[in-house]
């Protein structure tokens, strides 16, 4: 029996219109789709009716399928001769553990291809009206993960990160937001540095909190923002009002609703008076 191929496909941050042409073609041609928790329902709806779907989601402190099991599953499916799409939110190689899965397949001689996707840093910030770089405001951008391995302390050189001329984008940072803010403030980043949090970015359930670094944790807590959310810290956030273009659907959308959200509708959430960016 001929071996199959595994396509590690980036599904982007949620809006199905942001899928690449190749990603959409592979989804339609797949015999099996193994998908993550952050792949939006609108994208899952594009999977053909006869295709086998396997959920391999992971959430904070809860893995429905541990990574080692996912690796073994992809290997077994490919060895059975089927065409497999491993569908991952965002980009497979940006905090997506796609490289670990590719390594496992390579060690066992399985053919694979990687299809890049629009990562949350680019998609969510753009839909929130925030450019990652802007002349005179930010000449670089850094991607960080706020997730602590084994619930340990974040091990960052905060002094290097506290660069006022660089934009910071933090994935999976809601739980450790107070720690991130404290590290940056202690390292000298001004407390009035513009900062934002974007929940369910690029989808009809998008919610945006605009604030400043020092009060961002309080603003996020008062807005009851929940994962998935992307944090953006830097001067470029000050452009969000001027460059705002995306209007989330005000109608309730159960596909993106969160139990922690006071309202199912998308839109902006404003911090208390005197705490705006």
Image (spheres, grey):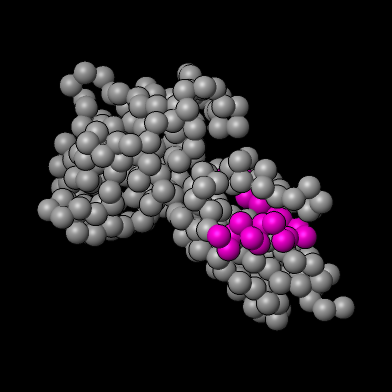
Say if residue 63 shows up in the picture.
no
Percent position (x, y) of residue 162? 21, 52
Q: Quadrant of residue 9 in the image?
A: bottom right
* Residue range (magenta): 21-38
Percent position (x, y) of residue 51? 78, 53
Decide whether residue 197 is among the magenta residues: no
Outermost right residue = 1
Q: Quadrant of residue 62 in the image?
A: top right
Say if residue 273 shows up in the picture.
yes
The vertical placement of 159 against 58, above or below, is below
User: In the displayed structure, does residue 61 sit left or right of residue 129?
Assistant: right
User: In the displayed structure, does residue 167 sit left or right of residue 155?
Assistant: left
Quarter in which the C terminus is drawn? top left
Query: At 55% across and 65% down in the image, what residue appears?
Result: 115
Quarter in which the N terminus is drawn? bottom right
User: In the displayed structure, does residue 204 sit left or right of residue 129?
Assistant: right
The vertical placement of 258 against 158, above or below, is above
Percent position (x, y) of residue 138? 19, 54
Query: At 68% across and 77% down in the image, what residue appears?
Result: 111
């Amino acid at each position: 029996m001929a071996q199959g191929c595994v396509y590690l496909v980036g599904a982007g941050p949620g809006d199905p219109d942001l899928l690449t042409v190749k990603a959409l073609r592979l989804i339609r041609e797949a015999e099996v789709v193994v998908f993550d928790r952050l792949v939006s329902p609108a994208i899952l709806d594009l999977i053909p009716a006869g295709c086998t779907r396997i959920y391999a989601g992971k959430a904070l402190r809860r893995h429905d399928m541990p990574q080692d099991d996912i690796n073994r599953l992809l290997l077994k499916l490919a060895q059975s001769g089927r065409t497999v799409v491993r569908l991952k939110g965002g980009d497979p190689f940006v905090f997506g553990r796609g490289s670990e899965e590719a390594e496992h397949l390579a060690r066992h001689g399985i053919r694979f291809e990687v299809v890049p996707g629009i990562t949350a840093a680019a998609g969510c910030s753009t839909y929130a009206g925030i450019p990652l770089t802007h002349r005179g405001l930010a000449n670089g951008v850094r991607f960080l993960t706020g997730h602590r391995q084994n619930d340990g302390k974040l091990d960052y050189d905060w002094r290097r990160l506290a660069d006022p001329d660089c934009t910071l984008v933090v994935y999976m940072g809601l739980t450790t937001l107070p720690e991130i803010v404290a590290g940056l403030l202690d390292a000298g980043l001004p407390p009035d540095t513009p900062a934002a949090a974007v929940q369910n970015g690029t989808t009809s359930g998008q919610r945006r909190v605009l604030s400043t670094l020092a009060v961002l944790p309080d603003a996020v807590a008062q807005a009851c923002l929940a994962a998935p959310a992307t944090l953006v810290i830097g001067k470029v956030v000050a452009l969000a009002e001027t460059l705002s273009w995306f209007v989330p659907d005000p109608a309730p959308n159960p596909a993106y609703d969160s139990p922690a959200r006071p309202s199912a509708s998308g839109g902006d959430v404003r911090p208390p008076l005197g705490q705006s960016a």
